[in-house]
Image (cartoon, rainbow, N blue to C red):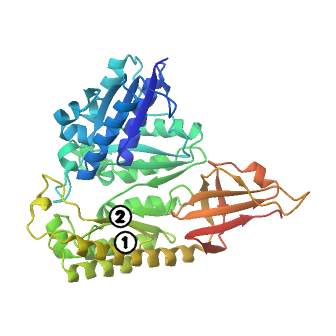
Amino acid sequence: MPSLKAITLGCKVNQYETEYLRQGLLSIGYVDAADDAPADLCIVNTCTVTNEGDAKSRQVIRRLARRNPHARIVVMGCYATRAPEEVAALPNVAEVITDKRELPDVLGRFGVVDIPTGISEFGTRHRAYVKVQDGCLLKCSYCIIPTVRPQMSSRPAAEILDEITRLVDHGYREIVLTGIHLGHYGVDFNRQRPKDQWLRLSHLLEQIVALPGDFRVRLSSIEATEVTRELIDVMAANPGKVCPHLHVCLQSGSDRILRRMKRRWGAKRFVDRCHLIRERLDHPALTTDIIVGFPGETEEDFADTCRVAREVGFSKIHIFPFSPRRTTPAAEMSDQVPGDVKADRVHRLTEIEAELRQQYFESLVGRELHVLLEGEATAAPSPGEGAEPSAVFTGTTCRYAPLELTVAGPAANELKPGMIVAVTPHRLANDRLVASIAPA
């Protein structure tokens, strides 16, 4: 049987698209090659968000060509879309897929007769990503993605619901809804329709939580202003089914820098929306992305960012020192921030992030949380002969906090990775919550 290796760089959407192609190929007889075995076919899904993403993509392709000299390499993803000739010139590259909408056609060319409309599994993980939307029309001055994914498209709700049902039937207990611009789900459907007939993300989420099965839903990255009152209503009405966690993209707390970034709203509107989320949801986790050292950022601008971070109380901040992306307007701005200044600001914001994360995690101690067990169980130290069985699990709570769970007694043999259990953490240690289950 022909063997296959599939490698993904970049975002959750890329991971979903790789899995879609992989499962289609497995359905016609391909098998996953062992790590140390050569493959007949290699799929590489590339990233081009940064110049480093391009470089890593090239490194992966060259390494695969060396280790799999007779393999056919098929390259897809955003770097392949942006620079197809550059990618095609790399060793052993047999095909470059420049449009993600071609993936069903690609499977057809490989001989897949029954083209799938989605996936049924997501590797060996216990959470599965479901792509519901593609494309971005925004023109943020630092971002290249609207250039390589400009076509706005939303998947039909019926197709998404069928896919989630299959994933839940296969044992996945957390479904992460993802898209290039998740908050714009349904926008393409709604053109020329009266507003009372619009389909939005809130409507899709409402249909998902009505599905039977023991699973929870998490939303991936979304713009704060697209967390509508209707979306919050659905989340608030289904606390056991929708994770009280939102990753809302701030990028900067300075209105002046936000304008230079060509973001669509100011810091006050962002903070107000976060306050609304906190008012309506039970102790939600708010996480974010922040770019430090954007061209022209002064110490005052950076102070504004730190102030907003504290005011919102993020539980996690993904901090990115600004990296000029060739061909974007921000890369051509003359007032680039020196590297040592960026490094200093990253360090200071990292300290704030650690402080805020500690505060939020401490506030979860004593609260009942639902945790998805993910780590393989390891035997806990035995207190002696004849003692009850015990095990230690790691997992992620509904509020996106890591948790370590020690289980003693019969439950140690009953609990398995992939289950969702309700626990009450009793302390915080090593940057994770700690809980235990003991025999009654």
Residue 38 in the image: x percent, y percent? 45, 27
- Residue where numbered disc 1 is placed: 274
Q: Where is residue 97 drawn, in percent x and y?
A: 26, 31
Percent x, y of residue 182? 33, 51
Q: Residue at x 40, y 40 (%)?
A: 16
Q: Position of residue 140 (x, y in %)?
A: 18, 59
Q: Nearer the viewer, residue 284 or 2?
A: 2
Q: From the image, which quarter does the C terminus lie in?
A: bottom right
Taking the spot 24% from the left edge, 74% from the top edge, the residue there is: 340
Q: Is residue 37 visible?
A: yes
Q: Depth check: 327 or 138 in front? A: 327
Q: Which one is nearer the viewer's eye here, 158 or 382? A: 382
Q: How far is the residue under mark 2 from the one under mark 1?
A: 9 Å
Determine the image quadrant of residue 224: bottom left
As drawn, the label of residue 248 is: 2
Q: Is residue 37 above or below residue 205?
A: above
User: Tag 1, which secondary structure?
Assistant: helix
Would you place residue 197 above or below residue 291 in this image? above
| Proximity of marks 2 and 1: CB atoms separated by less than 8 Å | yes
Decide which of tag 2 and tag 1 comes sooner along the chain. Answer: 2
Counting other residues with Cα less than 10 Å from the Cα at mark 2, is it few (<14), some (14-19), or many (20 or more)?
Answer: many
Q: Amino acid at mark 2?
A: Val
Nearer the observer, disc 2 or disc 1?
Answer: 2
> Is 27 situated left or right of 77 in this image?
right
The tally of labels here is 2
Tell me if I can see residue 150 in this picture.
Answer: no
Viewer-closest of 302 and 397: 302
Task: From the viewer's perspective, tell me whether residue 52 is left or right of residue 170.
Answer: left
Within-10-Å neighbours for mark 1: few <14, some 14–19, many 20+: many
Q: Which element carries disc 2, helix, strand or loop?
A: loop
